[in-house]
Amino acid sequence: MRWSKTFIPTMKEVPSDAEIPSHQLMLRAGLIRQLMAGAYTYLPLGWRAVRKAEAIVREEMDRAGAIELFMPALQPIELFERTGRKSAFGNVLINFQIQRGDRRVHLALGPTHEEVVTDLMARHISSYRQLPVCVYQIQTKFRNEERPRFGVLRTSEFLMKDAYSFGTSVDQLNSVYDQMYKAYCRIFARAGLNYLPVEAESGPIGGDASHEFMVPANNGEDRIVHCTACGYAANLERAETGRVPKAKPVSSSMTQLSEASTPGAGSIEAVCRALGTTPRQMIKTLLFLADGEPLACLVRGDHEANEAKIRRAAGCKSLQMADAVTIQSVTGAPVGFAGPVGLKCRVLADHDVAEVVDAVVGGNAVDMHLRGVNVGRDWQVDATHDLRMAEDADVCPRCFGRMQLVHGIEVGHVFKLGTKYSVSLDAEYLDEKELRHPLIMGCYGIGVNRIVAALCETSYDEHGLIWPLSIAPYEVLVVPLNVSDTETVESAERIYAELRNLGIDVLLDDRDARAGFKLKDADLIGIPLRVVIGGRGLKEGVAEVRWRWESESRKIPLESAVGDVVEMLARQKIQELAKVPN
RNA sequence: CGGGGCGUAGCUCAGCUUGGCUAGAGCGUCUGGUUUGGGACCAGAAGGUCGCAGGUUCAAAUCCUGUCGCCCCGACCA
């Protein structure tokens, strides 16, 4: 492609609306333009990158045995009503009524396609002989994000690869899941992303039923903990907190239990101020209703409770924060003064709570806290649980190393669904004994434009983007420095034409602009291999080639330039593929 | 949906506090010329309902009210 014939609006200045690197660079390099909050046009360069990512995803899905189809973005609202997701999605589900003849039709724009694909399978799968099967599509998804942000990272309309597997057994599910997991590793490695598979919250199935694929990035919206020693990684909601075994606190160091007046101090911070203590010395008592029954959860004052963990530990289906009335009746005090001493309901304690010596806790009375509180003496607990969110520098649950808190961009998610949708949509099959069973499902998503955005967010320098060969909009950029010089133009045109004939993605900067201007643009858009043809080199009969990520260019003879470029590309591709797992 | 910020030329912004000449600058664009290896120079030109609506005033980009849009933090996120 000739630069002058395509559309690459680069910008020297940084648009004021963009704050994070990927957003700024994608705008500046002419990859995207914003239409409104959460909706972007992909310009030719950006779209080419997306298409390359898409092609990799498609190749690896096919390789893993998934079969491609294409489902409508327009979906009848009834499907979401049957699975209960109309209310579960709430405002996120974009839905509206339209007029068709004399009736109203209520439609939704698909935020994902579990309903549609399960409905499809319900109609066409009848026997175990047809299973397992895994289908996928690459399609635009719609979600009414309450707050779109970070440019292309979080939008209301985005390209997603979603795959769905159907099988007769957990074994079949696990087998597809493993294949998908491996395919994902290959996809992200091929895309040149530094990625991390992390354990994620898995809902009703439990176990290792869900993994997210994260790209570590400072501006990532998700937070994960990662142990560099053993590789354990999990999102914050899921992450277990490890514990270094240690001796029980020495009892002689305990002080007397005493009451302390804390008028109006109902928060951790306020109590710390009033009593001159630290959050670490306090025990937070949170009251929940677990399946309707009051439940107290104790975590250290500087820790944050994790409701998913509490729900598992309590073995309950529903869990919500208790209302003020319940709190008053259970603790005998208003909100903010609950404590474990003399509490009249079920109590769950986090592991770390039991290690606080001379703790400060709520006194279960208005404006009163207790100091010098010790477990085993002042209150009792049979067992402790992991109830809190993981934190930076927590102990790794596997190897007792230290975990790091890192931010990440979620680019993929694999999930064992089980029978949630097949049950509500009557997707059943007949087994060998002619018994009916719901299909066992898995779902596997990849944010295709997030692959591109995550690359832009993590692969750049002060001059601009740095693409890997695999996703780059063009592999080679040929730059004739002076287009009013015949010899320069002829050499550049010849190299351009020959590379193109060899099927290489090559862009020719044929613009009549100054050398510096063109070279700055070349750095900005980040095409991996730059071939410069200029007066200086022509005198020696050479072109100057440079990888975008290297600082020095090398000279190659003009006569062999095309062959040399082809060979450099081939070698680089092999290098990129070497990082891809089998 | 809570909190904060911003809307003036294609882009980046000044002017607004304290109302008052024809609303400015840099970059970009167009014309002509000189240039041509890391964002050139000279001369000239085009480009603005100052987000929108209402109000106060002799007079509003500037003050007031409303409204819309965008960005950031938080809540939310299959």
Image (spheres, coloured by chain):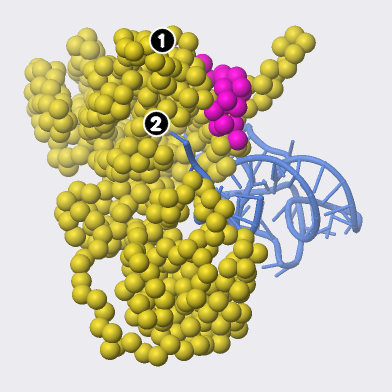
Element carrying mark 1: loop
Q: Residues within 10 Å of mark 2 (few under 14, many from 20)?
A: many
Residue A417 got which mark?
2
Q: Dot 2 falls on which chain?
A: A
Mark carried by residue A213: none
Q: Position of residue A103 (x, y in %)?
A: 75, 13
Looking at numbered disc 1 in the image, what kind of residue is underneath it? Ser
Q: Which chain is yellow?
A: A
Q: Nearer the viewer, residue A30 or A535?
A: A30
Residue A59 in picture, x, y percent from top left:
26, 18
Q: Which residue is mark 1?
A: A126
- Is residue A270 visible from the viewing direction of this image? no
Residue at 47% from the left image edge and 39% from the top image edge: A154
Q: State the residue at coordinates (35%, 77%).
A: A376
Eyeballing the image, is A428 above or below A287?
Answer: above
Q: Which segment did they paint magenta? A: A67-87
Q: Chain in blue? A: B
Q: Is residue A416 visible?
A: yes
Residue A423: x, y in percent?
A: 48, 25
